[in-house]
Every structure is written in structure tokens, then in C-alpha cells.
Amino acid sequence: MIGARPSEGKTSFALQLARDFADQNIPTMFLSLEMDEESLLERMYCNMMEEHNYKLRKGGYVNQKMDIFTKYLRTVKLIITCGVGKNWNEVLEAVNEVLPRPKVIILDYIQVVRMCRKDNRESIDEYLTEVKRIAIEQDLCFIVCSQINRGAAHAVGNMPSLAMLKGSGALEEAADKVLLLHWPYRYDKEADKGAYKVIVAKNRNGATGEHDIRFEPEYYLFSEKKLSDTIPHREGIN
């Protein structure tokens, strides 16, 4: 489970994970219930080729970089879909129909799922029960993105917690691991824009704790850098 408030980089974080898995030759499927494929590919392009997102939206890109990215998409074992996965039957069909069969499935995000004749809490509970069963039976990793409720905006330091996962207590119970994302700059524009924190709030078979990384929102890019490090100057960043 990956939990975060809106606009804190949850989709970008999950998409970079998907590409990292695929780059390790692990067949991966990214099921988006929020963004269209074009928007996700734009983010992926900026992340991989280190192109400024504003420049890309204005129609500017480097032809050579676009050629490299296009060739990459033809070979990488990564499938990105939009609208697939609103119920667990669609997930099962996707797993069984796609070749090579995905070993990692990432869903963005759980609060959008809908099951017939059920309220949102019941829908989430049933969905999680079934996809966990599918994951165990099919021997695959299922990563679920989740929003967290407004409590983080009022918590000490605006830090999220497990209790803030939105919609159902089953979110915490079903997960083997829960990562909560925290971007201080979202709450304080005087803070270091690149400072970012990944909180391992639950780890069934390991340690919990906090891990500081860097986030460059212009590139939707997360990196393993110490907070004392400075981000190298990139053309186009003020």
C-alpha cells in the first residue's frame, strides 16, 4: 500500500516504481483509474529523459530524447492502462490475458473502485479481499495506491499515519507493507522543495521507520540523495 494526500506525488512515485520493476525485466502492469495514458506517458518521459514538465506542456522536446523514449516503450515489459481495474474481475482478466503475464500490478488508486450495489467501504473491503486472493494464487505483487484523509493537514508536522488511510480499515489490515508519502513543501512554501519523506508505517516481515529522499516535481523524479545534497542545476529551473 502507498498512501498520500492528493498532489503529494503518489502517482509519480508509483509510476517510477513501475518503471524500476520493468527495467529489471519484471513484467509490470500499471492500472490507472484516475489519469489517461497520455498524461502518464508524459510523466514517464519527463522522469526518464529528465525533461522539464512545463517545457513539454508548451510543446518543446528534444527529438533525440523522444526517439530514445519511443524505442524504450517498444521493448520494456510495462503495460499502462486507463480505466481497467475498477473491479477485481477486470484485474483477473488482465492478469490472464496479457503476455507475458504480469508479476507486478500497481493500482492507482483504490478509492475509485466500485462494486455493484455496495457503498464505497464495502466495495474497498471486497476488492482488497479478492485481489489479495488473486495475488496469492497467481504469485504476483499487488501494489495499491490510496488517498489519506484530511487529518494529515492538521497533524503535528502534517505527518500522515496509518489511521488516515481513507475509506476502510481493511486498507491497513490487508497490506503486508504500507508506505506513507510526505512532502513538507506542500504545506510550507518556505521549506526545501526537494525534501521528501517515505514512511514505512507497516512492514509485516521487517522494520518500520522513515527514509529521506529527494523529489524533483519538475521531472516527477525521486532519487536516493541525502538531504544535505543539492540538486544539480538543470536548464529551465528557476
Image: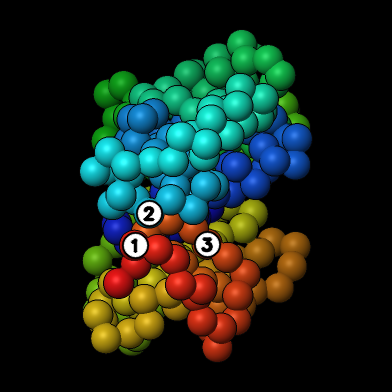
* Residue 132 screen position, x and y as percent: 60, 37
Comes first in the chain, label 2 or label 1: 2
Q: Secondary structure at mark 1?
A: loop
> How dense is the environment of label 3, judged by Cα within 10 Å: few (below 14), some, or many (20 and up)?
some
- The structure residue drawn at horizontal position 44% and vertical position 66%, both measured from the top left corner, is 234
Image mark for residue 42: none
In the image, what residue type sits under mark 1? Gly
- 190 or 72, which is in the foreground? 72
Q: Is residue 66 above or below residue 163?
A: above
The Cα–Cα distance between marks 3 and 2, rounded to whole angstroms, is 14 Å
* Residue 17 screen position, x and y as percent: 58, 49
- The structure residue drawn at horizontal position 68% and vertical position 15%, both measured from the top left corner, is 99
Q: Is residue 221 left or right of residue 139?
A: left
- The structure residue drawn at horizontal position 62% and vertical position 15%, both measured from the top left corner, is 98
In the image, what residue type sits under mark 3? Phe
Mark nearest the camera among 3 and 1 is: 1
The Cα–Cα distance between marks 3 and 1, rounded to whole angstroms, is 18 Å
Q: Quadrant of the C terminus?
A: bottom left
Comes first in the chain, label 3 or label 2: 2
User: Are the residues at dot 2 and dot 1 in contact (C-beta closer than 8 Å)?
Assistant: yes
Q: Secondary structure at mark 2?
A: loop
* Residue 152 screen position, x and y as percent: 31, 72
**Do we see residue 220 in this rendering?**
no
Q: Secondary structure at mark 3?
A: strand
**Do we see residue 89 in this rendering?**
yes
The Cα–Cα distance between marks 2 and 1, rounded to whole angstroms, is 7 Å
The residue labelled by disc 3 is 222
> How dense is the environment of label 2, judged by Cα within 10 Å: few (below 14), some, or many (20 and up)?
many
Image mark for residue 52: 2
Mark nearest the camera among 3 and 2 is: 2
Comes first in the chain, label 3 or label 1: 3
The residue labelled by disc 1 is 236
